[in-house]
Each structure stands twice: as C-alpha cells, then as structure tokens.
C-alpha cells in the first residue's frame, strides 16, 4: 500500500469525526442539510472501506500499518488494517448507510443531534477495528459508548428511557473494568501496544504472567458484556428492542465489536506460547450457555423486538463457541456466519417497525413516540411528502420470510451456507480435546436446535402478523423505509451466490490471524515516512 492509499487507513476514523463536527455547526432546523451531509459522509465511508478491502484480497501479509504522527511503535499510536479489520469496516459501513437511509423517513427528526451522534458512533466503532494498542481501544470504545447512549435514548418514551438507564449503568461498569484490566496488563508487561505485548508475553515470569492473565480476564469480561455472553447479557434484549428501528439496526454491529476484540486478542496474545489457549474453555462453555439461553429466549418471545434481541444472543453464542474451539477451519465458516447474521438481524430490526406499524401493540412494544406516530396535522403533511410502497403486505411478507430463513439457517440463503461450513468442519475434524466425539456432537446439536427454535418462533410470529389479524390496517410504508431492508437482504443473497470467493477470503483471514508473527513483525518493522516532520526531534523522520 503506497502513496495516498497508505493514508487511506485513517480515513474511516477522520471521515465521521469531521462530519460530526460539521453537523454540530448546522442549525437543527435545517434537517435536510444535516441529512445530506451525514448520508454523503457515510456513502464516502463505504467507498473507502471497499477500497481498503480490495487491497487485502489475495494478500498474505500486512501492508496497512499506519504510524500516527510518524512515531514508531510501541511508543506512538498505531493503526493496523488487515483482512479482518477491513471486513468489519465494510460491514459497518453497509449497516450504517442502510440505517441512516431508514431514519430519513421520520426518525432523524424526532430528537436533536441524531446525525452527529450517529457519525461519532461510526468513528468509535471504526477506530476500535483499526487500533493497534489497548489504550486507544479504550478511547474509541468510550467514544462509541457515549454516542450509543444518546442514540438509544433518541425519541424518548418511558420504555426507551428505562432501558437506556440500564444500558448506561452496565456500560459504565464495563468501562471501569476496562481501566482495571488495562492497568494490570500495563503493570506487568510494560506496554499496551498489541504487537509489542504479544512479543513480550512469553518473556514474562510465571508469577507476573498470572497477574497479566488476570488483567486479560478482566478485559475479556468487558467485551463479553458487549458481545452478550450469558450471564452478562441480561441488558441486551431489552435495550435493543426498546431502541428506535434505525438505531437497533446499527447496534447490530456493536455486539460483533465485542466478538472482534475477543477473536483478535485471543489469537494474537494467546494463540502461541506459555499462555496459549487462555480462556478458551470459558469461551467454549460460555458460548454454549449463551446459545441455549438465546434459543430459549427466542422461543419464549411474543414481541418481535425481543425475538430480534435474543437472536443477537444466539449469534453471539455461536461465535463465542467457535472461538473457544480454536480451530481455524471452523472459524472461517464462523466469519461468514458473523457477516450473514449481522446483516439479517439489522434488516429484521428495521422490518419490525414496518410490520408492526398497523398494530397498537407493536407501537407500544417499540415505545414509539407521538412525534413519530402522532395524529397531528403537521405529521400528516410531513408523511405525505414520501412515496408509499405499493403492494405493502406482499413485500413485507417476502422480507419477513427471508429473515426467517436467514435466522433459522435454512437453505438456500447465506445463513445455511455459513452454518453448513461450520458444522461440516466440526463433524469432520476432532479439534476439541475432551472428549472430541461427544463435544462435537453437542455443539452440532445446539446449533441445529437454535435454528429450529428460530424457525418455530418466526413461523408463529409470521402467522400471527400476516394471516390471523383480519381487522389490522395495512401499514403505510414509504419507499425510503423499505429500500434499506431490501438492500441488506439483497447483500445476504449476494453472499450466497458468491459463497465460494467469500469463503476463500475468510480462510485467508483466519490463516493470517493464526500467525501472530505476521502482525508483530508488520507493526515492529513499520517504516516511518522519510522527510516528514517529527515532534520528537523537531526535524524530519530521520532526526535531521
């Protein structure tokens, strides 16, 4: 990666940061202007993410190491863009543009500073995917959380405020644990740079290594809370179901941020050496417990919002279980499942509002505000500006059926392809130590039963929503609301058609993650830009 492409690595952080700052300067009454700025920034973010992803296709090495301020690691801030982070950037950008377009129908005008908070959320998430040290991971994590607090409360309503208060309290505790864990790691290893930390861990004395592992365990709890591992997941279904539809749609990536950090640190810090396999047993059995809890919650859910919230737990449980297995071939299928399930759940969250719009119960469940669904004349005039989607119930029914197929893992869509890739690999390789046959069968049965639970629940909800409500009014759905849902579902279809190339990319990603030395060498050997001013010397990068 040479020339201007090298500086493109920092663009996913700078773009939303600059956009949010500009949006703060625009008066709230100029909603169209703010929407266009936010949408333009997000579309540009997709182009940047796709350009970065393209540089990683077919590569086996790391070229996306960016030294912020031209300071060499481990003393300076380092951004690292590899195949995994590029994949997550693209996924985030796609979800963001879909959620943002959906919000333009009405949600972005329900409260103040929606677009600024949305862009700051993107900045925090993208920064967490790119950062190469734990301290800046905390910084981006806090930026993301601060923006998510405002977005979750966007639109007010008693249920949303109550869920938001619980969400804020839980995440403040998580932030405190983050600082404790980072402090323990820095006190024992003397560094927070991930590459430098991975190189130093084998050299730490056994007694101090135990303290370092304690810090890593506390840090792991933080991201297991965000990923929603049982029993740390009590807050997630309520918070996600109470959020407005576009906010819940973008929140689908937040649980995957927890999964990303756990996968990154597990394979980088504890993939080899004396601490190899640290925490894998907890991830394995915690993932199994989360999968069981999520499947039970899916079966028990009567409201579609809670069904979607528990589907997030099913997805997280499956991914945590696979990380605990620590088998590269299984993990390739899990990455495909991560992408497919995130797209499906995000589309489902937005679809729920459209499906339940004609039902009073649905409006109560989602805590929809009077500003959005009021009977005032000004609201009627605002809605009349949009174009109503023809054949509403038919299109909603098709999209609902597609979500049901994806979440339950039925053929022929990408949910089935991803689960088949994972299960076929598990059945064909005894990667788990004790006892391999029983453990493999247990995991396989759990994954299949979770799909059956999703199928039963989605079928029941579909019958109740589309067949039995004879007196229900047909919801008035605008094109701008339906297009994002269809866009995300079309992406899952494209993922199905291009399953071969997608799996090749996932295989290459896991092979790269399985070799921590590639990451360590790339960061340590990153070359500073010659002739660039250096704040340490007052001269150029060579110290002249």
Image: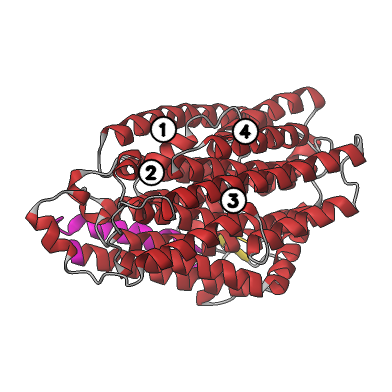
Q: Earlier in the sequence, mark 1 or mark 2?
A: 2
Q: Residues within 10 Å of mark 4 (few under 14, many from 20)?
A: many
Q: Does the magenta run of residues contain 137?
A: no
Question: Gap between marks 4 and 2, in whole Å?
Answer: 25 Å
* Residue at x 73%, y 31% (from the top left corner): 282
In contact (CB < 8 Å): disc 1 and disc 4: no
Question: Magenta segment range?
Answer: 6-32
Tell which tag, 3 or 2, sits nearer the viewer. Answer: 2
Give the mark toward the camera: 4 or 2.
4
**Residue nearest the viewer, comparing 406 with 251:** 406
- Return the disc, 4 or 2, that comes first in the chain's sequence: 2
Q: Are marks 4 and 2 in contact (CB under 8 Å)?
A: no
Please name the residue that numbered disc 2 is placed on: 148
Name the side, left or right, on which 82 lies relative to 384.
Answer: right
In the rendered image, which quarter is residue 205 located in? top right
- Specify whether residue 129 is in view: yes
Residue 132 is labelled as 3
């Amino acid at each position: 990666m040479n020339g201007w492409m090298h500086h493109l690595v920092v663009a996913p952080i700078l773009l939303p940061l600059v956009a949010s700052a500009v949006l703060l300067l625009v008066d709230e009454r100029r909603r169209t202007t703010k929407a266009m700025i936010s949408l333009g920034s997000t579309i540009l973010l997709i182009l940047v993410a796709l350009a970065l992803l393209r540089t990683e296709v077919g590569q086996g090495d790391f070229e996306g190491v960016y030294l912020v301020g031209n300071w060499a690691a481990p003393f300076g801030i380092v951004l690292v863009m590899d195949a995994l982070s590029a994949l997550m950037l693209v996924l985030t950008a796609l979800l963001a543009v879909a959620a943002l377009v959906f919000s333009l129908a009405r949600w972005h005008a329900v409260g103040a500073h929606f677009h600024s908070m949305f862009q700051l959320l993107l900045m925090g998430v993208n920064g967490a995917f790119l950062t190469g040290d734990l301290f800046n991971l905390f910084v981006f994590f806090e930026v993301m959380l601060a923006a998510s607090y405002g977005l979750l409360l966007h639109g007010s309503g008693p249920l949303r405020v109550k869920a938001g208060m619980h969400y804020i309290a839980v995440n403040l505790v998580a932030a405190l644990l983050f600082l404790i864990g980072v402090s323990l790691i820095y006190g024992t290893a003397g560094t927070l740079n991930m590459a430098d930390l991975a190189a130093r861990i084998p050299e730490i004395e056994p007694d101090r290594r135990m303290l370092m592992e304690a810090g890593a365990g506390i840090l792991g709890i933080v991201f297991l809370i965000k990923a929603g591992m049982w029993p740390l997941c009590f807050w997630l279904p309520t918070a996600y179901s109470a959020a407005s539809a576009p906010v819940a749609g973008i929140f689908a990536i937040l649980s995957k941020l927890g999964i990303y950090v756990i996968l990154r640190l597990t394979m980088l810090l504890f993939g080899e050496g004396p601490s190899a396999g640290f925490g894998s047993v907890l991830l394995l059995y915690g993932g199994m417990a989360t999968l069981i809890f999520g499947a039970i919650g899916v079966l028990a859910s009567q409201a579609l919002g809670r069904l979607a919230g528990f589907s997030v737990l099913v997805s997280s449980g499956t991914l945590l279980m696979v990380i605990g297995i620590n088998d590269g071939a299984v993990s390739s299928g899990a990455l495909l499942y991560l992408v497919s399930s995130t797209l499906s759940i995000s589309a489902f969250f937005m679809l729920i509002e459209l499906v339940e719009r004609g039902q009073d119960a649905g409006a109560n469940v989602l805590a929809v505000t009077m500003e959005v669904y009021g009977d005032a004349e000004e609201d009627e005039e605002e809605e009349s500006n949009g174009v109503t989607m023809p054949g509403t119930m038919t299109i909603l029914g098709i999209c609902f059926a597609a979500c049901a197929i994806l979440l339950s893992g039925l053929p022929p869509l990408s949910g089935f392809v991803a689960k088949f890739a994972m299960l076929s690999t598990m059945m064909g390789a005894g990667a788990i130590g004790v006892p391999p046959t029983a453990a493999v069968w247990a995991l396989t049965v759990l994954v299949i039963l979770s799909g059956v639970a999703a199928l039963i629940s989605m079928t029941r909800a579909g019958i109740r929503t589309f067949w039995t409500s004879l007196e229900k009014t047909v919801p008035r759905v605008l094109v701008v609301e339906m297009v994002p849902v269809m866009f995300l579902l079309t992406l899952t279809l494209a993922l199905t058609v291009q399953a071969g190339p997608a799996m090749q990319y996932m295989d290459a990603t896991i092979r790269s993650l399985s070799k921590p030395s590639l990451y360590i060498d790339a960061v340590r050997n990153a070359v500073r830009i010659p002739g660039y001013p250096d704040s340490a010397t007052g001269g150029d990068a060579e110290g002249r």
